[in-house]
Amino acid sequence: MGDMEQLANLIVQQTALSAQREEGMVAMMERLLSPGGSGAASSDHRPATNDAPARLPGAATPAPFLTSSASLRDFAAWKMKFDGYMLLTRADSLPPKEQRAILLSLLDEDWTRVIRYALPVAEDTLAKEVVMAMEAHLRTQRNVLVDRREFYSRIQEEGETFDDFLCSLKEIASFCDFCQHCFDTQLRDRVVCGARDDEAVKTMLENKDLTLNNAVDVCRASEVARNTRAVLRSGAIGKVSAYRRQRSQTREYGATRTLIRSVRGVVTDAIKTLLPVRYRCYLPELW
């Protein structure tokens, strides 16, 4: 058997072993995620019950940690991760005291002290309600005028895409306590006042019944058109530059050939003049 055949057989064996390992991992995960976990059947062969919620391994679900130096925006991001952590580990189905223990393990000492002494929550309060109380406490520590000032002064930076500018506006507006009826209106006004595209701003100002969706569509369309023009212009400039380089090279090549022919003619005339007649038979191509 040749070396190539042995190598092919070895690759096939390794592939089969990898497939078996993957199947084993999938089966193990299914047992972990199934109601009842790995202890699905007891010694007396009774069917598994749904009393014990299945949980993902700790390594598969990293727990988010929160410090007292986190801002309101950092808290909002942590809250989303914490809700996902509780959902994936199914810890939200545990008793309230166990949920509280999980929550406290993800907080630093300052937050633990706030929960124990500053928040009106009992020992048997669900973790979700405790988190809501933490958010309310954090909001009382910050003046909403600071967020609104940041919102009203936000403009699109140079080189910033419109979608990034819009996402930033929405994030800031979520902390400004705008009512549901005026939220879109505030965003629309900030888009019109903060956009850098003068053509888009002109188009938006011409529409008396402009909505937030209309403003977003106008700005996105104008940005796409501007980027497309830039790409086409750069492509056209590149083609013109290539054509000019080719012409320049052609001219240089032609000038070089002309110079060579001229030099060759001068040398030939000199040889004809200086070479004695008796040696001209050796260079008949010159005559």
Image (tube, rainbow, N blue to C red):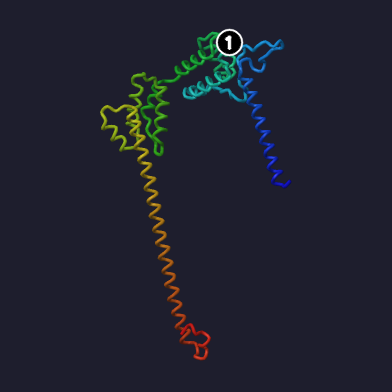
Provide residue 112's location: percent of width, then percent of height: 56, 16
Q: Is residue 189 left or right of residue 261?
A: left
Provide residue 203's location: percent of width, then percent of height: 28, 34
The three-letter code of the residue at mark 1 reads Pro
Q: Please name the residue shown 35% across and 41% down the image.
A: 226
Q: Please name the residue shown 49% across and 14% down the image.
A: 133
Question: Which residue is nearer to you in this view: 81 or 172?
Answer: 81
Provide residue 270's location: percent of width, then percent of height: 46, 83
Q: Residue furthest bottom?
A: 278
Question: Which residue is nearer to you in this view: 169 or 278?
Answer: 278
Q: Is label 1 in a helix, a strand or a loop?
A: loop
Provide residue 177's location: percent of width, then percent of height: 39, 19
Q: For mark 1, does the 10 Å Cα neighbourhood hold few (<14), some (14 to 19), or many (20 or more) residues? A: few
Q: Please name the residue shown 42% across and 72% down the image.
A: 258
Question: Which residue is nearer to you in this view: 84 or 31?
Answer: 31
Q: On screen, 81 above or below 160? A: above
**Snapshot quadrant of residue 246:** bottom left
Question: Which residue is nearer to you in this view: 111 or 104?
Answer: 104
> For mark 1, what is the residue?
95
Q: Please name the residue shown 44% across and 79% down the image.
A: 265
Q: Is residue 208 left or right of residue 67?
A: left
Total label count? 1
